[in-house]
Image: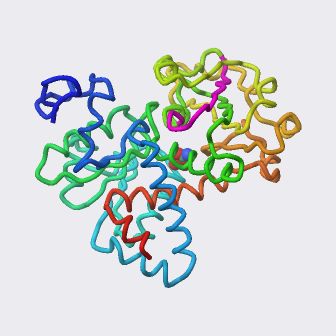
Amino acid sequence: MKIKNSNTDLTKLNWDEFYSLPLNQKLGYFDKEGRMFDCLFSQQLSSNNLKTLFDLANKIRKVAKEKGGLDWLQTLLSHKRAMLYFVQPSTRTFVSFQSACYILGMKVSEIRSTSTSSELKGESPEDTIRTFSSYADLIIMRHFEEGMAEKSAWMLNKTKRPISIINGGSGKDQHPTQALLDLYTLNLSFQDKGGIDNKTIVMVGDLKRGRTVRSLSYLLENYKNVKIIFVAPDYLKIGNDVKEFLKRKKIPFKESNDLVKCLPEADAVYVTRIQDEYDINNESKNIDYSKFHLKKEHLRKMKKSAIIMHPLPRRQELDVEIDKDPRAKYWRQERNGMWIRTALIAYLFRIENEINRY
Ligand code: CP
């Protein structure tokens, strides 16, 4: 497999050479027979992929409503095993993926901390992943280190037993399946309002270290005339890499530090918490994050048709009083995650036609 527009063989590169390549030159390495094999980055998901996954998720949730339908779904991958390797804290990504595996009948093993695996005895993450591939048919992983999901897939794709890897969150970098469920939620919310095209999305909070906003920004390239407004404290502004991407793709965006002023323009407000787990010297303590909280009194500034999203978990940045407002979609958003993740697993195992025929 060659680097795009070059004669260099991707399979011959060492990890550092491979990792340093621009994403668009190496995405093909994570495909097999012309379709996605590992799900690592938002940029792998085309508008065709998104439509396939949204339709499949809708079909699966409909089939799973009836006992007979759910029983049938549970036969589809009953011969397959998944490894859930989550060595960074998680509630909903872990449980929704676990539930997704159960919906398709998969058997699941889990490791949730390096302190309970042989990594404590000095085994490398690479050998750990290689070991999972001896027992499982799919690895779903969350790791504190940026690039670890990519490195795992890069390494396994060179072995005699390559299995798919799904990135359930990699350091401050990406969380593609969160972006997928965010888009699925936007798509469902705007299905009678012209879809996601032409909408203005306000993303507020810790945009520097929030991997969900990064992944969602990349995915919005699949829609027409979407505008993004990034609202963050100076220290936590969205990274230049995302801004460069948006400029390249001609996606209009602006930056602000005044949430209230931006609210009337929003079709969706995407609230995020401060990611102080990535602090090096307690720097979050010096930031007045309260200006980036969405409060009940702000709701009257928003359009009646707008929606409020949050990847969760939340702290004070999203007032619990807002839960009662019909525009609050975040509880639905997390449940949507289970259906779209089921669809993703079904897609990776190439059983979508079987499900669609039901
Ligand atoms: N949104 C999200 O990733 O939640 P968890 O950290 O609970 O998985």
Residue 36 located left or right of residue 193: left
Q: Quadrant of the C terminus?
A: bottom left
- The number of numbered badges drawn on the structure is 0
Residue 325 on image: x %, y %: 82, 50
When the figure is inspected, residue 297 is found, relative to residue 116, above or below; the finding is above
When the figure is inspected, residue 291 is found, relative to residue 40, above or below; the finding is above
Q: Is residue 125 visible?
A: no
**Segment tinted magenta in the rendering:** 220-233
Residue 129 located left or right of residue 308: left
Residue 86 on image: x %, y %: 40, 49
Measuring 64% from the left and 35% from the top, which residue is drawn there? 273
> Does the magenta portion include 228?
yes
Residue 208 on image: x %, y %: 54, 24
Q: Quadrant of the N terminus?
A: top left
Residue 25 on image: x %, y %: 27, 28
Measuring 38% from the left and 59% from the top, which residue is drawn there? 345
Measuring 66% from the left and 25% from the top, which residue is drawn there? 229
> Does the magenta portion include 76?
no
When the figure is inspected, residue 280 is found, relative to residue 49, above or below; the finding is above
Displayed quadrant of residue 308: top right
Q: Is residue 258 visible?
A: yes
